[in-house]
Amino acid sequence: MKKAEVEKAMNALDSNLTAIALREAECPVCSHDGTYISRYVEDVERNGEIVEVGRDCPCVRANQFLEYLKGQGLHGRYLRGVLNNLKPSDLCKLDPEKQAKVIAKVQAAPDEGWAFFGPPGTGKSTLSAAIYKNVAGREWYKHSFGSSYEINQHLWRITARQLCDEAQDYATGKYEEGVMKFLSGGQATTVYSPTVTRAKILRAKQKNLVPHLFLEEMDKVNLTEFRRAAIFDVYSAVHECEGQIVLNSNLSWDEFVQTFGETVWRIDEACNKVDFFRGTVHPPKVAL
């Protein structure tokens, strides 16, 4: 392929990796025409000279990205649908007109904070997953298609319960900052680090990376003062670092405020609040 063709193909991948892997969109290199290729040639400048370098076909990279998404807990319908192509669904309990309005608002500001409140079946998880895939696809593309380690330094998707459980384990010494620990005698063992902590968020900011926190199932955590503080500490750090917070809950906004108390002010400032109970969308008081 010529360099211009390669650039065109790569630009098409930014938000379509999932669709390509699921064969819902055409691969810009092999077009899914039965000649599934594993590599193509790209012209790259090295030391002032143009040399030909082999690259994996987008099909290969798209399938790797699909496996990454599955590892992040996205399955079934949440794997399908690119944010820019989302349309009202018959499976959603909202009427199509309201669905279309919310989808349009999210599509217009995919990098802003979003907080979705409403009963099951109103599209909260679908919208959150679509925003996540949009961010993850862009980061996958930016990091040469395939370093989940790089992405996981500033993009986190986690349930509120898991975040609280990991914070509890971290506080009691089960988790540590770092993944390897050497025992006496030089033997190495794995020590698991929490998925996301304030320290990780601050390190991302120091590396000029934008922190993205996707917090799922905010209504499915048995709150204690410790757990409430753990959640607030993390999304407060993301807010302070001018990052993106996306969360969803089966609670209404009023119920959410009653449950989480004064800690919700960060969300009130950082997120566009979509209350499916009332059918309203409120922009943040302070734009990120």
Image (spheres, rainbow, N blue to C red):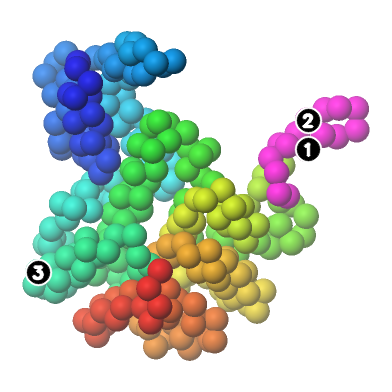
> Residue drawn at (42%, 73%), measured in percent from left and top?
270
Q: Which residues are magenta?
A: 176-190
State the predominant SS element of the stretch in magenta: loop
Q: Quadrant of the C terminus?
A: bottom left
Helix, strand or loop at label 1? It is strand
Residue type pointed to by label 1: Lys
- Cβ–Cβ under 8 Å for marks 3 and 2: no
- Cβ–Cβ under 8 Å for marks 2 and 1: yes
Relative height, residue 2 to residue 224 (above, below):
above
Relative height, residue 186 to residue 39 (above, below):
below
Q: Which mark is residue 181?
A: 1
Q: Is 49 in the magenta?
A: no
Sequence-wise, the earlier of marks 3 and 2 is 3
The answer to which image quadrant residue 282 occupies is bottom left
Q: Say whether residue 39 is visible.
A: no
Helix, strand or loop at label 3? It is helix
Q: Which residue is disc 3 drawn over? A: 96
Residue type pointed to by label 3: Pro
Furthest residue to the front?
Answer: 48
How far apart are labels 3 and 2 at the CA level? Answer: 56 Å
Left or right, 121 with respect to 245, comes to: left
Furthest residue to the left?
Answer: 97
Relative height, residue 220 to residue 256 (above, below):
above
* Residue situated in front as seen by the camera: 10 or 166: 10
